[in-house]
Image (tube, grey):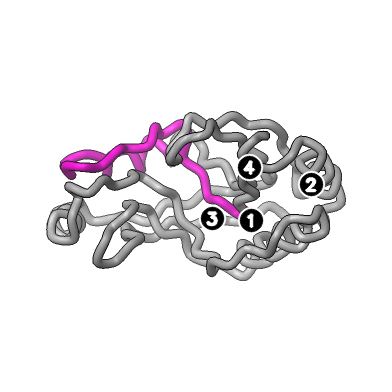
Amino acid sequence: MPRLFTALAVPPDVATALAAYQGGLPGARWIEPGDFHVTLRFLGDVERTMAEDFLDLLGEMRSRAPLTVTLDGLGVFGGGKPRAILATVHPSPEIVDLQDEQERLARRAGLAPETRRFTPHVTLARLRREANQEAVAMYLSQAPIFAPLTFTADRVTVYSARESTGGGPYLAEAEVPFA
């Protein structure tokens, strides 16, 4: 069973700029810059036939213009028990609409509805226990000022991940252009 998700790939120049924010936090497992992406819909471990059905449905995606993706800051998931360091993505109407379409297609393929609210981001690190709330707050307060980063996305990429706790390496299984 492949573990799949759809995402917007982060181009190499933006990935290099993001990598400058990695380091200096004990307990962080830093993601390789080549694996940076903005997840649209996590599909999970799916049967091959369901994966194929979903890929067929992706071919029915509405045509759309390339969209602008703006990374606008650093953040953390997990609050009192931090789980990840991330670069936040401005939730433009175009990105939200694209994610909504991914959700509709996933449901048509027979996948259960996503229960988590969509929060566009790029994961920079997964955190272990030693990266406690205080250490993460210190890391964020001492990080360089985040200059917004922008790129244009013109396709959805379907990635597979090895069975693990996340963080790559990811393999691009298919790319579906917007137009």
- For the N terminus, the quadrant is top right
Mark 3 secondary-structure assignment: strand
Q: Which residue matches tag 2?
A: 54
Q: Earlier in the sequence, mark 2 or mark 4?
A: 4
**Magenta segment, which residues?**
15-41
Name the side, left or right, on which 84 lies relative to 175: left
Look at the image and say whether residue 19 sits in the magenta stretch: yes
Q: Which residue matches tag 3?
A: 69
Please name whichever residue, 72 or 86, is drawn nearer the observer in this view of the structure.
Answer: 86
Q: Which residue matches tag 1?
A: 67
The answer to whether 93 is drawn above or below residue 156 in the figure is: below
Query: What amino acid is labelled 1 in the image?
Result: Leu
CA–CA distance in space, label 3 to label 1: 6 Å
Asked which quadrant contains residue 114, the reply is: bottom right
Which residue is painted at 52% across and 34% down in the image? Answer: 163
Query: What amino acid is labelled 2 in the image?
Result: Phe
Instruction: Give the number of the mark in front: 2 or 1.
Output: 2
Which residue is painted at 79% across and 46% down in the image? Answer: 54
Residue 82 percent coordinates (x, y): 28, 58
Disc 3 to disc 1: CB gap under 8 Å: yes
Instruction: Give the number of the mark in front: 4 or 3.
Output: 4
Q: Which residue matches tag 4?
A: 45
Q: Earlier in the sequence, mark 2 or mark 1?
A: 2
